[in-house]
Image (cartoon, rainbow, N blue to C red):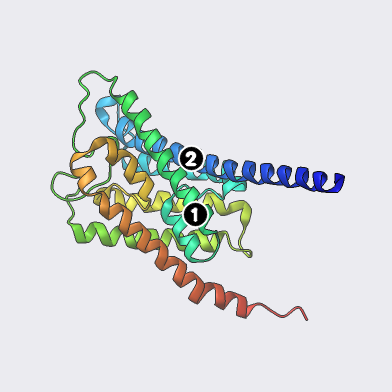
């Protein structure tokens, strides 16, 4: 009888520990995605415009706001959740067999929740400015076409998001591989996001992240919400393609080229 009671207590403790670990991962993804959207989109919507001060931070400043946030979060929450903070990354990792389905679902829910909460806080802050108006593509929303930055067409926007997400995920796979330099992976991934923004901001405002697009579009409404489909579908396609290429070409090639230890 005592043995059964002891086993029951151990089972309860293990379940409690497992639940705590899982919740920590989801909480980390929520905080990480919140930070990315709040800082990145905040830089675009507040500091990125010259009317807000002596001079706006411009394309370069916005690019670094997104990229450096990823660098900081990679070292802050990377050991806890892996710092996906992007549904396209999570789905790509699921495709590559690096995360379980249950965890992937929890990650994605946390990421979208974090992005929405960050957008709500941004709206609360920006609405306190004199003469504030929710214009089209407000709160750093992504978009394309007439009236949006470079006015690129749908094809340009779609191809840009697929290709850049593909490259972004390949960089993530290679830098976080067992033979990679784990201490520098966060920096390499963050800087790659800076480079991606330097190319894509005039075209789409740069998404490569469905959650980053979803939060601002939900509050901005209008064209931002109408065009949201592209920023969900294209990054996911790019991420899945990267996972397939990684599994089919790079991972297998590197493994087969390793010298035998026997």
Residue 110 in the image: x percent, y percent?
46, 43
* Identity of the residue furthest to the right in this view: 2
**Could you tell me if residue 165 is visible in this image?**
yes
The residue sitting at 85% across, 46% down in the picture is 1
The residue sitting at 39% across, 34% down in the picture is 118
Q: Name the residue under label 2.
A: 30
Q: Look at the picture and state if 178 lies above or below 184.
A: below
Observer-nearest residue: 23 or 148?
Answer: 23
The residue sitting at 40% across, 68% down in the picture is 241
**Element type at mark 1:** helix
* Identity of the residue furthest to the front in this view: 1
Mark before the other along the chain sequence, 1 or 2: 2
Judge from the rendering whether residue 191 lies leftward or rightward of residue 228; answer left or right: right
The C terminus - image quarter: bottom right
**Element type at mark 2:** helix
Crowd around label 2: few <14 · some 14–19 · many ≥20 (10 Å): many
Observer-nearest residue: 12 or 170?
Answer: 12
Crowd around label 1: few <14 · some 14–19 · many ≥20 (10 Å): many
Observer-nearest residue: 130 or 87?
Answer: 87
Residue 218 in the image: x percent, y percent?
28, 39
**Could you tell me if residue 65 is visible in this image?**
no
Q: Name the residue under label 1.
A: 104
Judge from the rendering whether residue 84 lies leftward or rightward of residue 147; answer left or right: right
């Amino acid at each position: 009888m005592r043995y059964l009671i002891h086993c029951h207590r151990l089972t309860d403790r293990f379940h409690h520990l497992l639940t705590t670990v899982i919740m920590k991962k989801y909480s980390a993804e929520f905080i990480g995605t919140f930070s990315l959207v709040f800082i990145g989109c905040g830089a675009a919507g507040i500091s990125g415009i010259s009317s807000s001060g002596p001079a706006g931070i411009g394309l370069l400043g916005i690019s670094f706001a997104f990229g450096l946030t990823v660098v900081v979060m990679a070292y802050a929450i990377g050991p806890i959740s892996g710092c996906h903070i992007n549904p396209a990354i999570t789905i790509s990792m699921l495709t590559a067999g690096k995360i379980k389905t249950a965890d992937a679902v929890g990650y994605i829910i946390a990421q979208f929740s974090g992005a929405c909460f960050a957008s709500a806080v941004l709206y609360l802050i920006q609405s306190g400015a004199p003469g504030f108006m929710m214009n089209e593509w407000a709160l750093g929303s992504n978009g394309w076409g007439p009236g949006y930055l470079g006015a690129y067409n749908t094809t340009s926007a779609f191809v840009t998001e697929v290709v850049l997400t593909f490259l972004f995920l390949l960089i993530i796979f290679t830098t976080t591989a067992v033979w990679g330099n784990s201490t520098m992976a966060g920096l390499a991934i963050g800087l790659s996001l800076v480079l991606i923004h330097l190319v894509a901001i005039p075209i789409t405002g740069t998404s490569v992240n469905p959650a980053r697009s979803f939060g601002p579009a939900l509050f901005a409404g209008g064209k931002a919400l109408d065009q949201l489909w592209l920023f969900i579908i294209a990054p996911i396609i790019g991420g899945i393609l990267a996972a397939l290429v990684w599994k089919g070409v790079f991972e297998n090639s590197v493994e087969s080229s390793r010298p035998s230890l026997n």
